[in-house]
Image (cartoon, rainbow, N blue to C red):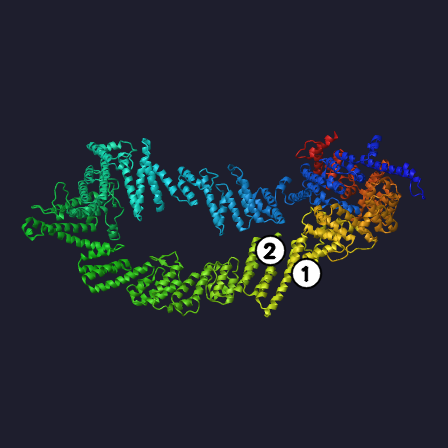
């Protein structure tokens, strides 16, 4: 009522109210506005008198906003803030800002909060209290981080949304007023630490979102901030639990991340393996966790760089648990077999790992393997374990550390010595090199001496010392035997040996432990000798049996030593002669039947004392043994001992050292015992203690016997019975050498029968007749003819010798009657012997020639026993019966020839000699597998044909061929030439031996050596060279060995008949040997082989054809080489080409083409498939370098240029192509430099260079645009116009985006691209940038007064030119840019081109200055404060407007003039101009001129000029001025701006029209005079545009509750609720509509619920809204019942689950249909 009464007083004549009326009207309007706010904020239910009075009288509603926020009523707070924001501006400060931020609850949903903060609060704060920006940023950062805990479901997107609010919120200058354009943040505020931290947080959250969504790698923000891009890749790999999934995960998920961040994949994977190793090494080793090994090897399998693969293998080796798993072992061994420089390092590491493995076996872990001080302790520990492998392990450690093994040997041998392991000790020393043995033994000697010298008297300790000296004695003996070269050291060893021998003997025989000093004390030794003699005297009286019994009954652990041995050893110690003692002991022991002791004494005596006395002792012992064997005296003979051999050996030893008086007796004893031994060898072996095979005491075999009788005739006869034979034989022996111990012989007397004197009246020979006859008969019966012959001749010889020796004096022979009887006896024996010899000789010849090996000397002897006629007849019969038995024929022929020579039968001799030659060659050739039967004893022609067969045998040599030729008189040169050709050209497998095949093929080197040796034997080599040269062209071109051998033979012949270079051919072969072919044989090779009838050799797969490279034309050469070109083989092919003197330029060009096609292009194609076109890998760089090296080697510059250009053309667009083009330019420049200006080629080179430079610039430009993602068609069209292209780049849309949204990513680097473009195209980038700055900062001034775009003068964020200018200036140093801009702002003319400066230009320059420079820099450069610069900018902005209006003003006049007068003057003179009216409005707002009459006119003019958008901003700005609410045009203006969008909108509205309609709805809410608006009419306008949500929002603002309810109900019935809900979600969730969106949404959902139209929302994105609405309104049962009836179980379960969470009740894991029914029943109850 008061309002209407006041308005009724207004008539048409009176334009103004009285002051009092105006005041009342203002109060009424204010109260009405407050009532509207209260009604919409709190609702009619909260209205009461007290509450209303308090609310309407509240001068500061900011506290109500804080209260509502604290209570969580965000919608109410938003509404109050929206309607009264202009009232808060005057009192808002940092304290209120802190209160506002603190009032926001932590539980407030971030989605709605972000909308309100970004669109409302943040622009307000930045405009009103810009100094509170740091406080706001800090709060936003903390709030964003806290969302990770409070809103986990939407993390990290909600955190990112919150963090980037500061950067994406509306800017204060978006208000659209000139005064708002003066809000320019200072540089130091833009780049402050808080902003930087917030940017970092935004970037981190952006990366975190990508990790969560794109790469499925969930990390906490705190974890992510500690990571780098590399470690994030590690975390991705960590999350792959199964190693077999790593390759797939790496390709599909991790590889895109690596490419995005330009990481080096190979280095990254290697670092991951190292990181994995470090992580696992920090864990407890006892866990034996080896899962990382499988993962590391899986990662290794994804690597391709060989060097890094080896590094990774090393890392796996270092970290693998010892002992290694099979997989690790296989991995290491696999890489050890590869050919790589790092294999040695791998081997060294493998050796160390083997050491670790070895130490693990001894329980040693974490041993410092690089500390040499610990190695000796380690060796001691290993050896101390005394395991079977301890020595080998210790040696492995020594070899691993390259130490001397002497220490190991020394310590191990000392251990063996202490444990009395002499044999093991000696075995060890035998396996050690001599030098190390010497060092070890000398150390052992020192150790042993110290041990003996310093031993205590403890008996236990003395037991341990016993093996020391004994073993040391054996060790020193071993060293002494092997020490031959160093005489000085040998003498020292002998001295030590004597000492230890003395000590050992004392310990062993006398159990006395003496030191080295004591053993040299004569008194102590004499005392010991006396004691032993007494002991010996006492014990010798006892019988041997008793001694033996006592010994046998003693302890088995102690070796019993006889008194004799002690006495013997003591004699040795005194160095006295023990001859007498030993002799007596030997005979005594033999009398006792102890053969073994006797032989031992005799053996030692013979070894130590080789003199006459020893010889006599040995002779006596041998005689005694023969007598005992004849008499069958019992003896203790060791098992297996050969007594006849022992006796024979004793006799032989005796004959070598006996005196001259005993020599004949010893000799006769040797012959007799030897005969006995021969008979014994043919005896049957049984268990009588005999052995058929002779085994001497000291040696295994008599060398003399081996040399003399080894391969000679051995008769096959019946085995004799030794029981019946041997006693007879020894009876004969004793008869020949009788034993007499009592007879004393005079000098020259003999005991043997042949030399013994005859005794008067006795026939000494009769005693031997009977045993000889019996034995001879026995031998003949057993077919032992040789023995019978030997016995016959030997017996007759002895008888004859006895007769002769006694009848040498004729006088004596006539006097003695007894001698006649002896003579008759000898004659009878001789006759009998002759007949026996004839008979036996023929039988032995038959046996002899039937042996496999014929003893020709023996056969000749037997032949000489027969008559001439009989023997020759016998020999030819044997030859004729022999057939082709060449061995037998040869043997008989040889015997016959020798016999004929002896008998002087020349004819027989020639026949036999010819037969010998044929038999010898038959035998030789048959062994070589050559049949000689056809030529045996045949003519010369057949023997000549045999040469061809002979040379083909691989076992034939030149000597044999020449022998064959000489033997049969053939031409040796022809045979040798044939042999050489066979060796070189037909070196195939032959036969060896008796026709057996030879499986081993002779090497070509061996064949060549043979051929060279044979060639030297030729008298004429010309025919050989001609033959080999002809054969060379027909050889297998892949058989280098045969070709090389042939060429070498030709070269060594020194013949000059050949027409090619032998050295060149041989050098070519050497290169071909080292080359392995990589391509299969081509068609031209097959044609060559077919032409020459050569089969394709398997070697053709790995070798190049020699003939095509050497003998054929150049084209054939290139056909072969071209197919073989590769980066690995090029060095060898280059050497071959140089050797063959072909064009190397051609080779280099072919190499370039090959590497390009086979290596470079496939690699680039692979990168292109992977999406890494711009990447330059290590492999590609190496390949490009190889290609360039080939091009640089081409001597023809024109060819090099053309080839390099061809390479560049073949490459796809990318950095490699640019590099190739740049190199091509270099080649072209080299070509130009290589030609003189007068040459014709100079102009051609220059033209080529110019063309190539253009191609390079265009390609480089295109590649640069592609790299920077600027390769759009509009830019590609300007490639040939680089200056225009650079200018166009600076107009790229990203420049505007990066200033408006600084937290966005992936902006192209325009500065970098422009600089590189200028460099590529040789343009001055600074000139271009200065031209752009002039264009952006100093545009032409438009004097059109009707122009409606003044924003170009005052709004940087909306002025693209100014944003581009700011971006251009960022490339320069700040002080340089500041000086440049100040020059524009203060000069009268432009520093760029001299144009006249206007205030518009100055204002633009100053705005840029404030954007790019901080306060300190501006003050330093301009010598003015920042406030002065800002004031100067404001003046320039207004003066620019005056300048456009042609109103002259200067800075001084503007500053000094009255602003109100200026405004009214402008209004008076220029109110008809829209720009002037806008300027008046801006000045009035700036200088607070609020004259109602003036403003009534301003509003009227703004309406008249249809400046609706600007008017809406002005109305919002003057809402805080209550005095202007009363003016008539105020309400009218509000109505006009609200309804303006509907005048031009159409259905459906366009996006801009939709935006305008939204802005109109905001104005409805903000309007202070809402009751004066036709809300129903506005709602109808929205309905016409089918914007039902906005229409319903207008209806919600109707003040009358009944009318509002009626209108809303009717409206809801007439519209689609789902459409209504959709429009709310799509158009009204901006945070600016102050809770109306939620009200409209609830009405729409309520309508749907009332209508039960649930099916429209089931499965849609709006169903969660419906679910939440039903839960909040306790209508869950309705919805669940509906869903169950419609079988929508999943949705029903979701509703029930959310409801139970809301109620705080437990939730079942599996909700079934029965449970849903139970739930519905519970809700009913």
Q: Do labels 1 and 2 touch, CB within 8 Å?
A: no
Report, in whole angstroms, how far the alpha carbon at label 1 lies from the one at label 2: 28 Å
**Coordinates of residue 401 in the picture (x, y in percent):** 43, 44
How busy is the neighbourhood of tag 2: few (under 14 within 10 Å), some, or many (20 plus)?
A: some
Which of the marked residues, 1 or 2, is nearer the chain's N terminus? 2
Q: Depth check: 322 or 951 in front?
A: 322
Q: Which residue is mark 1?
A: 1280
Q: Depth check: 1406 or 379 in front?
A: 1406
Q: Which residue is mark 2?
A: 1165
Q: Is residue 1199 left or right of residue 612?
A: right
Please say whether residue 387 is visible from this viewpoint. Answer: yes
**Coordinates of residue 1470 in the picture (x, y in percent):** 86, 51
**Coordinates of residue 100 in the picture (x, y in percent):** 75, 37
Which of the 4 image quarters holds residue 1577? top right
Mark 1, secondary structure of its residue: loop
Image height of 1529 relative to 1383, above or below: above
How busy is the neighbourhood of tag 1: few (under 14 within 10 Å), some, or many (20 plus)?
A: some
Mark 2, secondary structure of its residue: helix
Considering every residue shown, the one lying at the far left of the view is 815
Which of the 4 image quarters holds residue 892? bottom left
Image height of 1172 relative to 1633, above or below: below
Q: Quadrant of the N terminus?
A: top right
């Amino acid at each position: 009522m008061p309002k209407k009464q006041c308005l009724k007083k207004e008539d048409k004549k009176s334009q103004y109210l009285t002051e009092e009326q105006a005041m009342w009207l203002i109060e009424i309007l204010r109260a009405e506005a407050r009532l509207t706010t209260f009604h919409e904020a709190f609702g009619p239910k909260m209205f009461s008198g007290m509450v209303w009075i308090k609310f309407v009288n509240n001068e500061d509603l900011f506290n109500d906003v804080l209260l509502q926020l604290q209570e969580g009523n965000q919608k109410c707070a938003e509404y109050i803030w929206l309607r009264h924001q202009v009232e808060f501006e005057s009192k808002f400060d940092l304290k209120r800002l802190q209160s506002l931020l603190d009032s926001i609850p932590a539980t407030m949903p971030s989605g709605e909060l972000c909308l309100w903060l970004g669109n409302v609060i943040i622009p307000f704060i930045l405009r009103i209290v810009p100094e509170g920006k740091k406080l706001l940023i800090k709060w936003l950062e903390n709030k964003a981080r806290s969302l990770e805990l409070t809103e986990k479901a939407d993390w990290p997107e909600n955190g990112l949304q919150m963090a980037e609010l500061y950067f994406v919120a509306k800017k204060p200058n978006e208000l659209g007023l000139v005064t708002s354009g003066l809000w320019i943040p200072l540089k130091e505020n833009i780049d402050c630490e808080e902003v930087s931290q917030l940017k970092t947080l935004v970037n981190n959250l952006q990366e975190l979102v990508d990790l969560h969504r794109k790469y499925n790698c969930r990390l906490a923000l705190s974890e992510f901030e500690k990571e780098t891009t590399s470690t994030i890749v590690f975390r991705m790999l960590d999350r792959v639990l199964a190693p077999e999934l790593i390759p797939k995960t790496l390709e599909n998920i991790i590889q895109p991340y690596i490419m995005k961040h330009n990481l080096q994949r190979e280095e990254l994977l290697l670092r991951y393996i190292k990181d994995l190793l470090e992580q696992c090494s920090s864990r407890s080793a006892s866990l034996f966790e080896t899962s990382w090994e499988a993962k590391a090897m899986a990662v290794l399998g994804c690597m391709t760089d060989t060097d890094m693969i080896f590094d990774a293998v090393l890392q796996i080796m270092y970290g693998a648990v010892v002992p290694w798993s099979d997989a690790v072992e296989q991995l290491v061994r696999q890489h050890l077999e590869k050919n790589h420089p790092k294999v040695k390092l791998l081997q060294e590491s493998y050796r160390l790992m083997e050491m670790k493995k070895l130490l693990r076996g001894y329980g040693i872990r974490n041993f410092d393997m690089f500390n040499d001080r610990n190695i000796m302790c380690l060796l001691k520990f290993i050896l101390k374990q005394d395991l079977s492998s301890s020595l080998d392990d210790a040696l492995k450690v020594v070899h691993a550390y390259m130490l001397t093994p002497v220490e190991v040997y020394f310590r191990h041998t000392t251990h063996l010595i202490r444990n009395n392991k002499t044999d093991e000790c000696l075995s060890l020393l035998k396996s050690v090199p001599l030098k190390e043995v010497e060092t070890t033994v000398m150390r052992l000697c020192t150790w042993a001496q110290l041990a003996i010298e310093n031993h205590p008297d403890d008996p236990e300790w003395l037991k341990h010392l016993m093996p020391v000296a004994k073993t040391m004695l054996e060790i020193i003996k071993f060293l002494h035997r092997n020490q031959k070269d160093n005489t000085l050291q040998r003498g020292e060893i002998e001295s030590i040996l004597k000492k230890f021998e003395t000590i050992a003997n004392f310990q062993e025989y006398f159990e006395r432990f003496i030191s080295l000093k004591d053993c040299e004390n004569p008194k102590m030794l004499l005392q010991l000798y006396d004691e032993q003699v007494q002991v010996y005297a006492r014990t010798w009286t006892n019988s041997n049996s008793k001694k033996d019994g006592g010994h046998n009954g003693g302890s088995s652990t102690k070796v019993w030593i006889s008194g004799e041995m002690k006495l013997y050893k003591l004699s040795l110690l005194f160095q006295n002669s023990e001859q007498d003692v030993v002799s007596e002991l030997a005979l005594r022991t033999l009398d006792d039947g102890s053969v073994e002791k006797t032989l031992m004494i005799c053996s030692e005596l013979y070894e130590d004392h080789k003199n006459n006395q020893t010889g006599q002792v040995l002779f006596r012992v041998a005689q005694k043994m023969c007598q005992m064997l004849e008499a069958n005296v019992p003896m203790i003979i060791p098992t297996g001992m050969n007594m006849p051999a022992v006796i024979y050996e004793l006799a032989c030893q005796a004959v070598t050292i006996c005196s001259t008086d005993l020599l004949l007796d010893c000799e006769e004893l040797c012959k007799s015992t030897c005969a006995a031994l021969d008979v014994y060898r043919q005896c049957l072996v049984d268990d009588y203690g005999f052995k058929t095979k002779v085994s001497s005491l000291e040696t295994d075999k008599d060398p003399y016997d081996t040399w003399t009788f080894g391969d000679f005739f051995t008769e096959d006869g019946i085995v004799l019975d030794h029981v019946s034979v041997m006693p007879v034989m020894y009876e004969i022996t004793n008869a020949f050498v009788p034993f007499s111990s009592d007879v004393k012989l005079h000098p020259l007397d003999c005991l043997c029968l042949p030399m013994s004197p005859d005794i008067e009246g006795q026939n000494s020979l009769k005693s031997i007749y009977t045993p000889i006859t019996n034995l001879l008969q026995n031998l003949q019966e057993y077919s032992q003819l040789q023995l019978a012959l030997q016995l016959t001749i030997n017996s007759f010889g002895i008888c004859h010798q006895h007769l002769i020796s006694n009848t040498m004096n004729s006088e004596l022979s006539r006097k003695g009657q007894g001698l006649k009887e002896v003579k008759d006896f000898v004659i009878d024996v001789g006759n009998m012997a002759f007949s026996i010899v004839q008979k036996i000789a023929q039988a032995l010849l038959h046996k002899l020639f039937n042996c496999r090996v014929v003893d020709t000397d023996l056969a000749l002897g037997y032949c000489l026993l027969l008559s001439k006629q009989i023997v020759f007849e016998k020999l030819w019969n044997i030859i004729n019966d022999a057939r082709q038995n060449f061995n037998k024929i040869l043997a008989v022929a040889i015997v016959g020839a020798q016999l004929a020579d002896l008998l002087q039968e020349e004819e027989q001799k020639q026949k036999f000699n010819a037969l010998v030659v044929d038999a010898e060659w038959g035998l030789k050739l048959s062994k070589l597998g050559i049949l000689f039967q056809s030529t045996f004893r045949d003519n010369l022609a057949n023997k000549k044909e045999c040469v061809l067969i002979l040379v083909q045998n691989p076992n034939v040599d030149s000597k044999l061929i020449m022998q064959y030729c000489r033997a049969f008189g053939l031409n040796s040169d022809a045979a040798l030439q044939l042999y050489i050709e066979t060796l070189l050209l037909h070196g195939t497998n032959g036969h060896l031996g008796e026709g057996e095949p030879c499986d081993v093929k002779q090497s070509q080197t061996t064949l060549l050596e043979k051929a060279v040796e044979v060639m030297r034997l030729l008298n004429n080599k010309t025919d050989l060279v001609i033959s080999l040269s002809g054969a060379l062209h027909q050889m297998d071109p892949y058989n280098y060995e045969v070709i090389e051998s042939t060429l070498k033979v030709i070269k060594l012949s020194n013949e000059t008949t050949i027409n090619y270079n032998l050295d060149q051919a041989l050098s070519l072969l050497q290169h071909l040997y080292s080359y392995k072919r990589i391509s299969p044989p081509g068609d031209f090779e097959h044609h060559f082989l077919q032409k020459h009838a050569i089969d394709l050799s398997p070697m053709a797969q790995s070798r190049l054809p020699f003939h095509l490279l050497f003998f054929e034309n150049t084209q054939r050469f290139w056909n072969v080489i071209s197919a073989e070109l590769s980066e690995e083989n090029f060095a060898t092919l280059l050497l071959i080409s140089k050797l063959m003197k072909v064009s190397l330029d051609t080779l280099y060009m072919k190499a370039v083409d090959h590497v390009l096609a086979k290596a470079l292009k496939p690699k680039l194609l692979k990168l292109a498939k992977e999406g890494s076109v711009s990447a330059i890998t290590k492999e590609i760089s190496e390949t490009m370098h190889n290609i360039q090296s080939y091009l640089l080697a081409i001597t023809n510059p024109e060819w090099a240029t053309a080839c390099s250009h061809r390479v560049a053309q073949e490459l796809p667009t990318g950095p490699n192509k640019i590099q190739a083009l740049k190199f091509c330019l270099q080649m072209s420049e080299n070509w130009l430099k290589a030609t003189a200006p007068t040459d014709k080629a100079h102009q051609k080179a220059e033209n080529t260079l110019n063309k190539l430079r253009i191609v390079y610039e265009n390609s480089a430009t295109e590649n640069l645009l592609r790299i920077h993602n600027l390769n759009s068609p509009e830019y590609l069209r300007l490639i040939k116009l680089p200056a225009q292209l650079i200018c166009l780049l600076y107009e790229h849309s990203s420049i505007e985006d990066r200033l408006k949204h600084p937290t966005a990513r992936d902006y192209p680097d325009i500065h970098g691209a422009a600089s590189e473009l200028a460099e590529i195209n040789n343009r001055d980038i600074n000139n271009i940038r200065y031209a752009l700055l002039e264009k952006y900062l100093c545009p032409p001034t438009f004097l059109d007064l009707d122009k409606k775009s003044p924003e170009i003068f005052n709004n940087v964020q909306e002025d693209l030119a100014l944003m581009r200018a700011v971006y251009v200036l960022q490339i320069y140093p700040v002080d340089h840019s500041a000086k440049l801009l100040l020059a524009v702002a203060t000069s009268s003319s432009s520093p760029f081109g001299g144009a006249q400066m206007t205030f518009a230009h100055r204002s633009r320059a100053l705005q840029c200055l404030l954007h790019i420079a901080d306060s300190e820099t501006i003050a330093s450069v301009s010598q003015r404060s920042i406030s002065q610069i800002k004031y100067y900018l404001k003046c320039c902005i207004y003066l620019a407007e005056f300048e456009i209006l042609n109103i002259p003003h200067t800075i001084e006049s503007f500053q000094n003039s009255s602003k109100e007068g200026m405004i009214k003057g402008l209004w008076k003179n220029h109110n008809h101009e829209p720009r002037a009216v806008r300027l008046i409005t801006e000045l009035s707002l700036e200088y607070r001129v609020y004259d109602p009459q003036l403003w009534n006119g301003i509003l009227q003019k703004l309406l008249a000029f249809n400046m609706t958008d600007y008017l809406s901003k002005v109305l919002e700005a003057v809402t805080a001025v209550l005095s202007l609410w009363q003016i008539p045009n105020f309400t009218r203006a509000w109505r006009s701006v609200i309804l303006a969008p509907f005048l031009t909108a159409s259905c459906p509205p366009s996006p801009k029209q939709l935006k305008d309609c939204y802005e109109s709805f905001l104005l409805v809410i903000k309007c202070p005079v809402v009751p004066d608006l036709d809300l129903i009419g506005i709602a109808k306008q929205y309905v016409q545009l089918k914007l039902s949500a906005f229409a319903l929002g207008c209806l919600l603002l109707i003040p009358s509750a009944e009318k509002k309810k009626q209108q809303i109900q009717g409206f809801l019935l007439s519209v689609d609720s789902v459409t209504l809900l959709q429009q709310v979600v799509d158009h009204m969730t901006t945070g600016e509509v102050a809770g109306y969106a939620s009200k409209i949404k609830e009405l729409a959902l309520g309508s749907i619920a009332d209508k039960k139209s649930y099916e429209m929302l089931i499965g849609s994105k709006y169903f969660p809204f419906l679910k939440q609405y039903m839960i909040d309104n306790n209508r869950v049962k309705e919805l669940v019942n509906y869903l169950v009836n419609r079988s929508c179980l999943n949705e029903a379960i979701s509703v029930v689950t959310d409801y139970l969470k809301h109620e705080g009740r437990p939730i079942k894991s599996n909700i079934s249909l029965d449970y849903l029914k139970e739930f519905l029943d519970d809700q009913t109850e």
